[in-house]
Image (cartoon, rainbow, N blue to C red):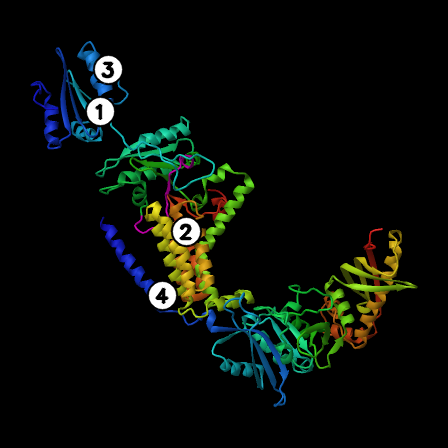
Amino acid sequence: MKHRFKNYKVIVVAAMYFSCVFVLAGCGFKDIDKRVFVTGIGIDPAEKEEGGYKVTLKLSLPVASIKSSTGPNYEYLVYEGETLAEAIRILETHTDKILEFGHTKIIVINEELLQENMKDFMDYFVRRSDIQLIAWVAAAKTSAESILRVEPSAESAVSSTLVNFFGSNGTESPFITSTFLYEFRRDMLSDGVDAVLPLVEATEDKKELIVNKSLVVKEKSKPFELTAEQSKYYNTLLNGMSGFSYKAEKEDLTFVINMEKTTVHYKVIMDDGKPTSIKMNVKMIGVIGQSNKNLALNNLKEYDKIAAEAVKKKITDFLTTVQEKNLDPIGFGLRYRTMMLYDKNTISEWQKAYPDLPFDVSVDVALKGTGAIE
Amino acid sequence: MTNSKENPTTPKLMVDLKEQMNPSFDVMLIPLQLEDEVAFLLYLKTAVDGDKLQSIIIKPFFEMKSAQHYGAYIQSSPDLLAIKSEDNIPLELTKGSVLIAVQQNFFLIDVKKVNTSTVQQTLMEPTVYGPQQALSEDILTNLNIIRHRYKEPTLKIEILELKDKTHNDIAIIYDEQTVKPAILKTIQKRIKELDTTLIQSAGELQLYLNGKRFTLFPTLMLTERPDRICYNLDAGKVILMIDGSPHALIAPVVFFDFMVSMEDNYHLFWVTSFTLVLRYFGLITCLTLPALYVAITSYNPDIFRTELALTVAGSRIGVPYPSFIEVLFMLVFMELLTEASIRLPKAISATATTVGGLILGTAATEAALTSNIMIIIVSAVAISSFVIPINEMSFSIRFCRYILLAFTTFFGTVGFILGFLGILMFLINKESFGEPYLKMYWKSRRSEKGVKSE
């Protein structure tokens, strides 16, 4: 019985300990309702100051009940500063809650900023530990602020339309280029590949967002805009995006193929360590989605050929267009560098050779059917 | 019955004993006399079974030809006890024996009356399939159940007597073939070393056998299922039973034993695997969920999906206290509710749960004392803590989550991880009668130590 009484001492100590827990809390402790989540950051060139930035933060406000709330609740904080860090520091004084960048999923950059001093502001995002490197980066036409401020009517509470465009969370389309922050930075800094960013535009009434173009960004030069069609080829070649549809014509026959699967292999052909040509093999599997004539299953091989021919032409077109601009979004140069032993002249040799390299594209289309029952 | 007819030839031992036990009203010293043949009985009326006494002791006396025959008859009784010493006799009498004197010979016959030998239904560890009967409160009935279920000649039952005031019998049951002798020896030694005044139940015995004053995790398992006992006998464990308690103790046990329900043996493989995974998931949930809530909402809200973060933030609008007080408040109320429904009579406990669970839960959120998410977490924690099949472990885990909660409140997610590691380390360091408590049997001890021969 004696030691039973001693147990009470322990209980008393434990009780005191726990009552301390009630009153004390560490300084890292900050309740979720005392934080405000920044879901998007927009950067524009400053209007008043030369060389400065205008920073727009899109804050998502918490909703008490999703069912009863009618639409998304956002707040925007805008400030101009000489540097990004400064502007954000000042913006912290514009709200009563702590700015939480852990949920920043999109960084929108005005396309005008994408030529010079990109490292200057990109550095901030990479250094700041709470901004995740898996945030999407997008370029904005006209202004980043206006893009962030678009609130489509289809948007529901606590969701972000702009973010759903990228990746395969929401819509999946070969027209949309998706670039993570880490990808963007990696491609920016490495030799032999140029970063590609999606270009976000808004409709005139500022009600809808459109993402189907891309920008090939290269430091110290004006970004090159890829059209929607070119973006589609870029995404297909690089990521094998499905949903690729293509119109093929021969004489009076016209049909559209829906590609289900695309696999791309390419190789830099070298002769004595010098690049001589680029060989690319594209394999596509799909069905015919639309046709102006009745198609016979027996002739499938023939349709394969017609389609392959047409796709090959388009791909070569795309590749030569970017080559003329001396841009390399696919990363042939990077592939070349991986094949070579390190030499400080490797990249300059490549840069010399690339503008004149011939492309040897072979396309193999395998249609699974005519898309209709005979 | 009066003692007026006391025969002058009453043996001195009996008279002395009777005096020693006075003034208890139930001490009986009666002579049996038929013509010249005489026998004397000394017993406690409240301890013996009157019918049994009448039929096997008194009646034969009058049917026998002589006292000599009667003496032989008594001597061959299956319930005959050896008289170790005269000092021992009073104790045997209190246990329900009768002392018989025939022709200057003394015999002790066990005619005890047990009112607790009814076998109970399984209450603590119910199964859908499998045996529905548990143990009784009488040790002999229990031993009979075990013998009946485990018919191996290697099954050994040793009976020891407690040195406390109950003088209860403790049975040590083991299968000679499978038991580890070292463990058996430790257990026997510990029981012999017991030095307490009153041990009334298996649960109490477990506390004293532990060997340590402050224990959080049980090192012996308390069970009421005969099938679990046999299952563990087969596995080479030692079973302890104490008279008067409907539970048996199993030693040694490891942590994983507490996660096994006997139901697992009666189902198909995939069904069992699924329920086992479910059980471990429940274990982790009820241990970590409250602490995780604090860690995530107050230190690292980036872990959530954005939508969830906003909803959690939204549901916390207007909650006046920081998250850990909210969690503690709700958890304590849940514990109160659990305690209340255990202690209350069954008829009332349903009301308590309804009032507590439904009304308190809804009202607390309405009054903005806690968030909706918190209610979900507390109910998830409550439900998952019931998934652990053995109640003792469930209680230990319930306690552990407060340790985790405290660590998390002070040191955030890092504290949570450290606290969890601490609990793991504590468990790994623990032993149950020399057996490692939380050992993963993936590698042999030899390869773990890195020695080639041992």
Name the mark on residue A21: 4
Q: Position of residue B363 (x, y in %)?
A: 40, 62
Q: Over which residues does the magenta segment extend?
A: B212-229
Q: Chain of mark 4?
A: A
Question: Which quadrant of the rendered structure holds the N terminus of chain B?
Answer: top left
Residue identified by numbered label 1 = B50
- Mark 3 and mark 2: Cα distance apart in space: 59 Å
**Tag 2 secondary structure:** helix
Point 81% across, 64% down: residue: A246
- Mark 4 and mark 2: Cα distance apart in space: 25 Å
Q: Is there CB contact under 8 Å for labels 3 and 2?
A: no
The amino acid at mark 2 is Leu
Point 54% across, 42% down: residue: B271
The amino acid at mark 1 is Gly
- Mark 1 and mark 3: Cα distance apart in space: 19 Å
Q: Nearer the viewer, mark 3 or mark 2?
A: 3
- Mark 3 and mark 4: Cα distance apart in space: 74 Å
Instruction: Confirm whether circles 1 and 3 share one chain.
Output: yes
- Mark 1 and mark 4: Cα distance apart in space: 63 Å
Q: Is residue B145 above or below residue A276?
A: above
The amino acid at mark 4 is Val
- Mark 1 and mark 2: Cα distance apart in space: 53 Å
Residue identified by numbered label 2 = B427
Instruction: Confirm whether circles 3 and 2 share one chain.
Output: yes
Relative to B132, is A92 on the left or the right? right
